[in-house]
Structure formats: structure tokens, C-alpha cells
Image: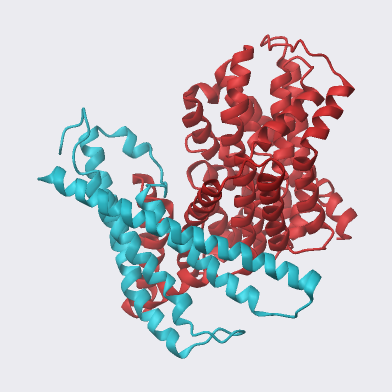
């Protein structure tokens, strides 16, 4: 067991891609328990790890997001958000947050939010007089809303692997996502004067709100189509995702006419590359997770946690600490696939609702997307804007602390997470 | 000499990648069309077809696994960079080569054992539409082989020292 752990952590630390690390460590695990005879299991597990219909929602949500980005819909979302909150001190920072919420209803990954707003809102904020590091910090803090509010790739992975209702988790993610937006906006308002954040010369105008709503209406309909379809049980997540692609495609080709044949081919290629990177991690992780199950590692970790305390609050705190620390160093897809089978049953032992536990686990991994040293959103925004990670981190810490606060609220107040699923799904 | 080999490898890798990317796009487009058809036949046409889910699953696996070599060619499979970044250029290149060799070994292993798995698919059939499982299983060795080739290409491509770096 120690050898496999050494291979895993050693290769990860020296920089082997995580998709390869999981495969090599998993294969070493197979040899350790069954010698050469078990090697044939590796490609089988690799294949079976991907053979789940519910995974298909992921490439489709990725594709819908890619199409939306290419058709200039992001700009319309930003305009609408700006008409709502742009008049306040620090207007564009507030706009960034609200736009993240709307964007979150269309995309399943935080990095696509960072990329979209890093290219559009950060330059606009800098031009208006915000510091580059603060603009980046706001964008990264807002990106976390993306995979918290549905659709969410991580929820699809967790739901598929653990047999938890994806629709239930989607519904449960809405309030925590909105809460993150609200606390971040309160912080921006609170530091506005001290940081001397710019005030827009445009006041609030209902006329402008209606005008930008009308202009972006078709784009704003997208979250409603996705969420309405899934949450009200009309379609499955995969079907909703495919419908989202059809709708984005319709907007790009027929309505906005900005999607050329070449852009469609590039979108398909980009989608398959992003999918390929995530699916390699899933496939390789399923080799390692077989070994972990065989070695009864989930049970051993659960016993270890419960030996520290059987108090649910203490166990939940330990789980959150583990996830936040692991997420700091490991790709969150890999962390989720490896830790879900460990933590899922543990949360059940202490009596947590599976949907509540799933949302808590995913939110804590999402937060780790913005923590140094390896937060993916931090890297994306840094590479797009050229701002140094160290400088962004200084402005980002208050946001991280606030979002960790929301995480603890989610963890210890189940009613907040389960309120919407109860209302919509009767669960 | 090394520069010539590096250029030839890069030219070959680029062409291979161009073809594989188009195959990915085609598979992705097929996947979208199959699921659109599924939605349409389930809610509008009521044809009662049941093969869509199984067929689309295999197309999805092929599409995702064919994108793995594209990711390798573009170096999009990312790992932790801080150890690499902390090293001086010459050592960094050496470590990158070692990591590439480990990756290559894993994908060659996946190719060789994947061929065995695909061959075993001759006696297995897809549950609903009865296709031989050789076709879906073959995605693993094909992914392994193409990724191995692209890892070698990237190794050769990066072999020639860049400006300002010293060859180890």
C-alpha cells in the first residue's frame, strides 16, 4: 500500500500529468495485489470507467458553453448584469459577480467562467481604474459560482459515481451559489470606499435594464431551458445538455449569425479535447479506485475519521479540512473521483443526506480552484491577463475566507441546501 | 542532425494530429446528432428505439479517447508545475524527458494489453444492438498507440534546445 501511495504522490509532485499518474499508480496497485495476472484488468477498468451514460451531459455542457462564448453571448450577459448593478460604487466588480451567476446557468466548469470574463471584464475593469490584481481576484471569486449553480460537471461526475440524484444536486446548488454571489457583493460594497473603487457615471435606469434584457433575452433563456428541463423532471441531464447545445447552435447560426462552419469544427475539436483531458483522468482513476476498493481504503479512512470523533460536526469539519487541503494540490476531478467513494459512505454513516453531502463536497473542491499554489482558475486568469498569481492572491484572500464561510454554512445548515430540492422535487 | 529529426517528427505529429482532430470533431458531431435524434424520437416521434443510449455511449468513449493523443500533442494534460519551475532549464528538460518516458511506458502498456482486451471482445456482444464488442474495446489500444506516438513526437520536438537554454 505504501509503495502505491509513494508512486502516486511522488509522480504527482514531480509534475507527471495527473491522468498519467492515476493510471501508473493504479497499474502498480494491480501488480501489488495480483502480480502480472492482474495487468489485463487495467485496460478493462480504463474502459468501464467511462462507460456511463450520465457522463455524456459533460461534453454537451462544455460544447454549449464553447458555442455561447464564440457567438458573443457573454457580452450580452455582461451588459444585462451591468444594467442591474453597474450603477453602484465598484459597479463593474458587482457586474462581474452577477454576470457569473447568469453564466453559471449555462456552463458547468469554473475555468470557462474565468476564461470568458478574464478576456472581457478584466480589461474593462482595468480601463475604468480598478487594479489588475483586484479585477482578477473578483473574476476568480465569481468563477466558483459556475460549477456550484447548475449545470455542474462535478455534480454529474459525483451523481454518476455515487448514484445520487443529479437533478437533486442541481437544485441544491442554486442557493449556495447565490449566497456566494451575495457575500462577495457585500464585501465589494464594504471595501468600495476604502479601496477607492470607481463609480460609473451611468445611474440606474429601468429603461436600460429592459433594453439590455430584451437584447440578451434569447441568451438569458438558456439557463431556464437547462434548469427547468432537468429540475422539473421533463428531461434527463444528458437530454437537457443536448437541448442546450441545440439552442446555442440555433442562436449562433440563425439568430446572431456569428457561427461559421469553421467555428463549428473548432468548437467540436475544442470540446473533445477538454472532454478528453477530463475523461483520461476518470478512466485512469477507475484503475486506481479498483485497487483502493480491494484494499478497503475507504473503510480504513472512515474508521480513522470516526476514531477521532463520532460527533457529526467534528467529522464534517475533518472532511472539509481534508477536501480543502487535497484540492489545493490535486486536480479537482481526480480528487473527486478518488475521494467520493471514501467520503460518500462516511457522510452517510453520520446521517447526512446524500444530496447535501454531495453539494458540500463539491463546493469545497470548487473553492480549492482558487487557492494557491495550484488553483486552476487562478492559473487561467493569470495566463490570460498576465497578472502574477502572488499579486492576485493578496486581493483574493478575503473572498476565499468568505466563500469558506459559505461552505461551513452549507455544511452545518442542511435546510439551506435542501430547501430548493424539497420545493421543486419534493425530496 | 537532432534539429532535422525534431523537425521531421514535428511535421509528422502535426499531420497526424490534424487527422485525429477531424476524427474527434466527426465523432463529437455524431454524438450530438444521435442524442438529438434520441430526444426527438422519445418526445415527438415515439419510435421506441432503444439502441441510442448504448450506441452513443460507445461513440462518446471513442470521441473522448481519440482526444487523449490530441491533448498529448498539445501538452494539455497538465500536472503540477512547481517542481519543474523550480529547476534550472537544463534539469527541467531532463525531468520532462523522464516524465514523458513514464507516460510513454503507461500508454504502450495500455496499447499492448488493450489489444488483448479488444480481441476478447470477439465473443462479446453489445447488450441492445448486438454489435461485437471489438469495436468499442478497440478505442483503448488505439488511444494508447496514438498517444504513445504523440508523446514521442513531443519529446523529439522539444529535444532541440530553445533560445537561451543549454542542452543537458
Q: Is residue B136 above or below residue B121?
A: above
Q: Is residue A128 left or right of residue B106?
A: right
- Specify whether residue A126 is in view: yes
Residue A362 pos. (x, y %):
65, 49
- Specify whether residue A1 is in view: no
Q: Is residue A42 above or below residue B164?
A: below
Residue A396 image-quadrant placement:
top right
Count of numbered badges drawn on the protein: 0
Of A153 and A258, the residue lying toward us: A258
Residue A355 image-quadrant placement:
bottom right
Of B46 and B82, the residue lying toward us: B46
Residue B141 pos. (x, y %):
37, 71
The residue depicted at 61 percent of the width and 31 percent of the height is A117
Name the quadrant of the C terminus of chain A. Answer: bottom right
Residue A339 pos. (x, y %):
56, 57
Of all chains in the rendering, the one displayed in cyan is B
Q: Is residue B8 left or right of residue B140?
A: left
Q: Is residue A376 left or right of residue A17?
A: right
Q: Is residue A264 above or below residue A398?
A: below
The residue depicted at 85 percent of the width and 18 percent of the height is A204
Of A13 and A121, the residue lying toward us: A121
Question: What colour scheme governs how the chains and residues are painted in the rendered image of this protein?
Answer: by chain
Q: Colour of chain A?
A: red
The residue depicted at 80 percent of the width and 48 percent of the height is A224
| Residue at the extreme bottom of the image, as rendered | B123
Q: Is residue A417 above or below residue A300?
A: above
Name the quadrant of the N terminus of chain A. Answer: bottom left
The residue depicted at 54 percent of the width and 72 percent of the height is B58
Residue A266 pos. (x, y %):
50, 48
Amino acid at each position: 500500500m505504501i509503495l502505491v501511495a509513494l508512486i502516486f504522490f511522488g509522480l504527482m509532485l514531480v509534475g507527471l500529468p495527473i491522468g498519467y499518474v492515476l493510471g501508473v499508480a493504479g497499474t502498480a496497485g494491480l501488480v501489488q495485489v495480483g502480480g502480472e495476472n492482474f495487468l489485463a484488468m487495467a485496460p478493462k477498468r480504463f474502459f468501464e470507467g467511462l462507460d456511463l451514460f450520465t457522463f455524456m451531459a459533460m461534453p454537451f455542457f462544455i460544447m454549449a458553453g464553447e458555442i455561447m462564448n464564440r457567438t458573443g453571448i457573454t457580452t450580452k450577459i455582461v451588459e444585462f448584469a451591468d444594467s442591474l448593478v453597474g450603477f453602484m460604487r465598484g459597479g463593474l466588480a458587482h457586474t462581474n459577480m452577477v454576470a457569473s451567476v447568469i453564466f453559471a446557468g449555462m456552463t458547468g466548469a469554473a475555468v470557462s467562467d474565468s476564461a470568458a470574463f478574464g478576456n472581457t471584464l478584466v480589461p474593462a475593469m482595468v480601463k475604468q481604474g480598478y487594479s489588475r490584481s483586484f479585477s482578477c481576484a473578483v473574476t476568480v471569486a465569481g468563477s466558483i459560482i459556475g460549477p456550484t449553480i447548475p449545470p455542474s460537471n462535478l455534480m454529474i461526475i459525483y451523481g454518476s459515481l455515487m448514484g445520487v440524484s443529479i437533478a437533486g444536486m442541481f437544485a441544491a446548488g442554486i442557493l449556495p451559489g447565490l449566497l456566494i454571489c451575495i457575500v462577495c457583493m457585500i464585501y465589494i460594497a464594504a471595501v468600495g470606499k476604502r479601496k477607492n473603487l470607481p463609480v460609473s457615471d451611468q445611474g440606474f435606469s429601468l429603461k436600460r435594464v429592459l433594453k439590455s434584457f430584451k437584447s440578451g433575452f434569447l441568451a438569458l433563456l438558456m439557463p431556464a431551458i437547462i434548469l427547468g428541463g432537468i429540475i422539473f423532471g421533463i428531461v434527463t441531464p444528458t437530454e437537457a445538455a443536448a437541448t442546450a447545445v441545440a439552442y446555442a447552435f440555433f442562436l449562433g447560426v440563425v439568430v446572431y449569425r456569428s457561427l461559421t462552419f469553421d467555428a463549428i469544427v473548432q468548437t467540436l475539436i475544442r470540446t473533445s479535447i477538454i472532454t478528453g483531458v477530463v475523461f483520461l483522468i476518470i478512466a485512469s482513476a477507475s484503475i486506481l479506485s479498483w485497487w483502493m476498493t480491494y484494499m478497503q481504503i475507504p473503510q480504513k479512512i472512515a474508521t480513522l475519521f470516526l476514531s477521532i470523533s463520532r460527533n457529526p460536526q467534528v467529522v464534517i469539519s475533518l472532511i472539509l479540512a481534508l477536501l480543502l487541503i487535497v484540492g489545493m494540490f490535486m486536480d479537482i476531478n481526480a480528487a473527486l473521483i478518488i475521494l467520493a467513494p471514501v467520503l460518500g459512505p462516511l457522510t452517510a454513516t453520520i446521517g447526512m443526506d446524500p444530496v447535501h453531502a454531495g453539494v458540500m463536497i463539491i463546493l469545497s473542491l470548487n473553492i480549492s480552484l482558487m487557492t494557491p499554489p495550484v488553483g486552476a482558475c487562478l492559473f487561467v486568469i493569470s495566463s490570460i491577463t498576465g497578472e502574477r498569481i502572488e499579486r492576485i492572491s493578496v486581493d483574493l484572500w478575503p473572498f476565499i475566507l468568505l466563500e469558506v464561510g459559505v461552505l461551513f454554512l452549507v455544511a452545518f445548515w442542511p435546510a439551506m441546501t435542501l430547501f430548493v430540492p424539497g420545493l421543486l422535487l419534493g425530496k | 542532425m537532432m534539429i532535422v529529426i525534431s523537425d521531421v517528427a514535428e511535421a509528422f505529429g502535426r499531420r497526424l494530429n490534424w487527422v485525429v482532430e477531424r476524427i474527434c470533431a466527426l465523432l463529437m458531431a455524431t454524438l450530438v446528432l444521435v442524442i438529438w435524434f434520441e430526444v426527438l424520437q422519445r418526445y415527438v416521434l415515439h419510435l421506441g428505439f432503444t439502441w441510442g443510449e448504448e450506441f452513443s455511449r460507445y461513440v462518446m468513449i471513442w470521441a473522448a479517447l481519440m482526444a487523449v493523443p490530441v491533448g498529448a500533442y498539445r501538452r494539455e494534460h497538465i500536472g503540477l508545475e512547481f517542481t519543474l519551475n523550480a529547476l534550472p532549464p537544463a534539469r527541467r528538460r531532463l525531468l520532462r524527458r523522464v516524465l514523458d518516458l513514464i507516460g510513454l511506458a503507461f500508454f504502450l502498456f495500455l496499447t499492448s494489453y488493450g489489444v488483448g482486451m479488444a480481441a476478447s471482445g470477439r465473443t462479446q456482444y453489445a447488450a441492445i444492438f448486438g454489435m461485437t464488442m471489438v469495436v468499442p474495446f478497440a478505442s483503448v489500444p488505439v488511444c494508447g498507440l496514438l498517444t504513445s506516438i504523440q508523446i514521442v513526437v513531443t519529446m523529439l520536438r522539444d529535444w532541440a534546445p530553445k533560445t537561451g537554454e543549454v542542452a543537458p
